[in-house]
């Protein structure tokens, strides 16, 4: 009994409840004769699509800036990288590589400037980040209409100017990671390239976190007064964490978009921070501590529950409640994650 209680305490109430719900929906799906192989395929794909966005939360938490509620900044720069690559007519690995090569330097510069600003509003990073994200997305809505792109696949057909709201990636580098070395096991498709790319990003973050600079950044984030007394420049390491997070967000949206098969512009970047924040908090992180394990657990639970619950509810409600329940489940998880005691 004590061993079970110890395991429960280690898992925590939030992960216990969500895991229980996940297995409950899987059981219902089995009895409804739904394709579990298809569901597990979708879970793996959605994990690979979203995990790097969640990973982008780790550097800001470790550096003491808290949850990065302004992932939209990096996401927009990642979208710009994709658009330039598509404007040039590049496809496959070349298009994917060029998108990264353009987005990463832009994200690093933007992250540095954003970090300078956040250092002036210490203690209000999440609130300021949220409002700053809204401002950036709103300004970029004007840019998308005035941007000097000429590729007919990107601009509106009638006027020939202004980017479309949703852009297909079929002729560029859509699915380039998903299809790389993919294979099937008992009907479950393993998106090997997608998972390997996340593993590479996670490895880079892990290795960096254990370097001298990474350890100094973590010390600065865990205790500002102790870090200052040890001669560490706390503001510098906060900026570094924000730069890394912004670069990861730019990389993440490129990975997400190629897997989704479409670029989504205008207001779409606004909706990436909340699910990513909820995922890492559900995974066991808080405003002072975050790790790659929290990223993996949280993303699997969040995306897994959404993936499995929707087709089950769609069958039970005969399609009339699926979208409503999706909103309730996703926003319910987000609200619970952001308001639970351990998150503060």
Image (tube, grey):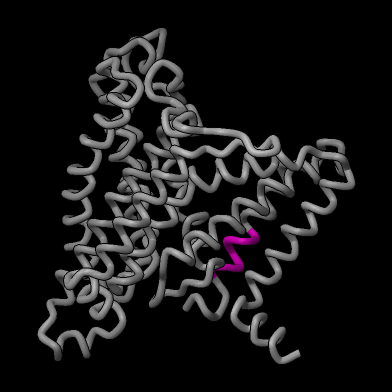
Please tell me whether residue 141 is drawn above or below residue 304 in the rendered image.
above
Q: Toward which corner of the image does residue 313 lie, by quadrant?
A: top right
Q: Residue 188 location in percent, x, y?
A: 65, 38
Position of 144 compared to 290: left or right? left
Q: Is residue 337 magenta?
A: yes
Q: Is residue 43 magenta?
A: no
The single residue placed furthest to the top in the displayed view is 158
Q: Toward which corner of the image does residue 58 lie, by quadrant?
A: bottom left
Taken as a whole, is the magenta stretch helix, strand or loop? Answer: helix
Q: Toward which corner of the image does residue 24 lie, by quadrant?
A: bottom right
Residue 334 visible? The answer is: yes
Q: Residue 323 location in percent, x, y?
A: 71, 41
Q: Residue 211 location in percent, x, y?
A: 21, 69
| Residue beneath the point at 46% across and 25% down | 166
Asked whether 302 or 266 is in front, the reply is 302
| Residue beneath the point at 14% across and 91% down | 229
Question: What is the magenta range?
Answer: 332-338
| Residue beneath the point at 42% across and 28% down | 176
Q: Residue 60 location in percent, x, y?
A: 32, 65
| Residue beneath the point at 39% across and 66% down | 67
Residue 130 visible? The answer is: no
Position of 114 compared to 303: left or right? left
């Amino acid at each position: 009994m004590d061993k079970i209680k110890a395991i429960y305490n280690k898992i925590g109430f939030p992960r216990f409840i969500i895991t229980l719900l996940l297995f409950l929906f899987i059981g219902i799906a089995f009895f409804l004769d739904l394709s579990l192989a298809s569901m597990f395929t979708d879970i793996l794909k959605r994990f690979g699509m979203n995990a790097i966005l969640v990973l982008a939360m780790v550097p800001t938490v470790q550096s003491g800036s808290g949850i990065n509620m302004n992932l939209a900044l990096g996401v927009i720069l990642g979208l710009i990288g994709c658009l330039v690559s598509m404007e040039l007519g590049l496809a496959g690995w070349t298009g994917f590589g060029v998108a990264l090569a353009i987005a990463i330097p832009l994200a690093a510069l933007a992250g540095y400037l954003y970090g300078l600003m956040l250092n002036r509003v210490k203690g209000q990073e999440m609130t300021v980040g949220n409002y700053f994200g809204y401002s950036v997305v709103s300004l970029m809505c004007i840019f998308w209409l005035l941007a000097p792109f000429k590729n007919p696949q990107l601009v509106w057909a009638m006027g020939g100017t202004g980017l479309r709201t949703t852009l297909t990636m079929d002729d560029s580098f859509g699915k380039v990671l998903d299809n790389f070395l993919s294979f099937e096991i008992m009907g479950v498709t393993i998106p090997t390239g997608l998972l390997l790319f996340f593993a590479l990003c996670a490895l880079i973050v892990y290795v960096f976190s254990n370097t001298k600079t990474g350890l100094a950044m973590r010390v600065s984030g865990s205790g500002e007064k102790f870090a200052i007394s040890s001669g560490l420049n706390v503001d510098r390491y906060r900026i570094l964490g924000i730069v890394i997070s912004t670069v990861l967000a730019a990389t993440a949206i490129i990975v997400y978009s190629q897997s989704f098969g479409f670029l989504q512009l205008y207001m779409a970047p606004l909706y990436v921070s909340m699910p990513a924040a909820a995922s890492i908090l559900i995974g066991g992180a808080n405003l002072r501590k975050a790790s790659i394990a929290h990223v993996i657990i949280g993303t699997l639970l969040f995306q897994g529950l959404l993936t499995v619950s929707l087709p089950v509810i769609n069958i039970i409600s005969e399609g009339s409640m699926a979208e409503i329940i999706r909103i309730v489940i996703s926003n319910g998880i987000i609200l619970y994650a952001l308001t639970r005691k351990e998150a503060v």
